[in-house]
Amino acid sequence: MIKFTLPIVPTAQARPKVAVSGKFAQAYKTEGQKANERTLEACLKDFAPKAPLSGPLALDFIAALPIPASASRKVREAMLAGHEFPAKKPDLDNIAKQLKDAMTRMQFWIDDAQIVILRCKKVYAPTGFWQVAVYPAVVAAAVSGRRPPTDGDSRAMPLMGRG
């Protein structure tokens, strides 16, 4: 298992911008996106494995966003207690994409298609940070006590809300 905390504010993977020149269109990343990627990669480099991880993997992370300065004391306390969630941008799926793409570039794994279990959440904290863990998916399956479904066995992994 590789487990670490990055002391930077989580950012989302931005959509590429498109420039049209004559009959040609070209997609590009903004300077801000490139800077966010460089910062994240610089923090990740100390935790990257010597060789990329192989096989199916589980990725767990918490994206802690800083509490807005405009938050009242009462709201701030609720945010820190976990009663208020950051149901705002950046979107959680774009935050996950930013992290997975950076970890792929830093060779934590061969391809992010190896991530078969993804558990993530956004929370508020006094300062922003990422808390990350990556480990073999078989360990995650053993811990959860659930087995993968077999053909015709819809009870192997019950849907959310069903016993």
Image (spheres, helix red, strand yellow):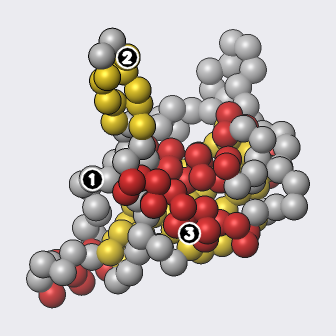
Tell me: 24 left or right of 58. Answer: left
What element does badge 1 sit on?
loop
CB atoms of marks 1 and 2 within 8 Å: no
Viewer-proximal residue among 81 and 7:
7
**In this view of the protein, can residue 145 be seen by the observer?**
no
Residue labelled with disc 1: 89
Density class for disc 1 (Cα within 10 Å; few <14, some 14-19, many ≥20) is: few
Residue labelled with disc 3: 131
CB atoms of marks 3 and 2 within 8 Å: no
First in residue order: circle 1 vs circle 3: 1
Tell me: 149 left or right of 158. Answer: right
Kind of residue sitting beneath label 2: Phe
Distance between the alpha carbons at the discs numbered 3 and 2 = 41 Å
Viewer-proximal residue among 62 and 89:
89
**What is the x, y in percent for residue 141?**
74, 45
Q: Is residue 20 above or below residue 58?
A: above
Residue at 83%, 50% in the rendered image? 52
Please state, as top left, top right, bottom left or bottom right, where the N terminus lies in the image. bottom right
